[in-house]
Amino acid sequence: MTIDRSARLAACLGLGALALGVSATEARAVPAFAVQTGEACVNCHVGGFGPQLTPFGREFKLNGYTLRTNKFNVPLSIAVQASYIRTDKAQNPPPPGFNPNDNFALDQVNFFLAGGWLDHFGAFIQGTYDGVAKAWTWDNLYLRLVDSFKVK
C-alpha cells in the first residue's frame, strides 16, 4: 500500500494540530495584556471573550491599560489563521493564485500592539493582513493618555 505525498502532508498537519490542541493552556486575554496584568480573559471580558467588558475591564481601559504586575513585557501579540484544502475532485478553474487542489492559504494574520507604557500612556492597536486578498487593514486604534487629579 502506498500513501501519496498529499495524504502524508495532511496526516502530519493533523498530528501537529492535535499536538498544539493538547498542549494549549488556559485561554487568556490578548497575550500582551495577559502578560502585563497576570489576569485571565474572564476578569476583563464578559464570558471570557470580548468585546463586552466587566467592571474590572472598563476600569483597566479607562486607566489607559497601565495596570501591570509584570514590570517588563513586550506589548506585541500575533495571531495567525491558516488553512489547507484538499478535495476529492480538482476545482476547475482554480481561483487566482491557487492550484486546482491541495491548497495551503495564509488566511489572516492579526498584529496587536497592546499595553501600557510608563505610568500614564497605553494603547490597543490592531492591524490585520488578509493573506487571500493580499491586503492590510486597521482594525482598532485606541491611544490613551491618562492622569488623575482632585478638584477643590
Image (tube, helix red, strand yellow):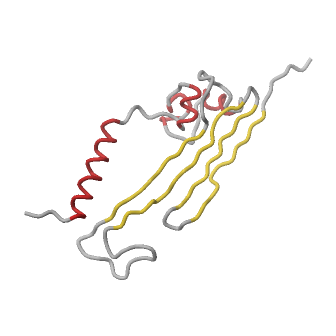
Using the image, determine if residue 79 lies above or below residue 106.
Answer: above
- Residue 43: image x %, image y %? 53, 28
Q: In this image, 85 relative to 123: left or right?
A: left
Using the image, determine if residue 130 lies above or below residue 54.
Answer: below
Q: In which quadrant of the rendered view does residue 62 lie?
A: top right
- Residue 123: image x %, image y %? 69, 39
In depth, the one of 138 and 2 nearer the eye is 2
Q: In this image, 53 relative to 132: left or right?
A: right
Q: In this image, 108 relative to 125: left or right?
A: left
Q: Which residue appears at 45% of the width and 59% of the height?
A: 106
Q: Which residue appears at 15% of the width and 63% of the height?
A: 3
Using the image, determine if residue 22 lies above or below residue 67.
Answer: below
In depth, the one of 39 and 79 nearer the eye is 79
- Residue 91: image x %, image y %? 32, 77
In depth, the one of 74 and 26 nearer the eye is 74
- Considering every residue shown, the one lying at the far right of the view is 152
Where is the N terminus found, in terms of image quarters?
bottom left
- Residue 145: image x %, image y %? 78, 35
- Considering every residue shown, the one lying at the far left of the view is 1
Where is the C terminus found, in terms of image quarters?
top right
* Total count of labels: 0
- Considering every residue shown, the one lying at the far bottom of the view is 93
Q: Which residue appears at 41% of the width and 31% of the height?
A: 26
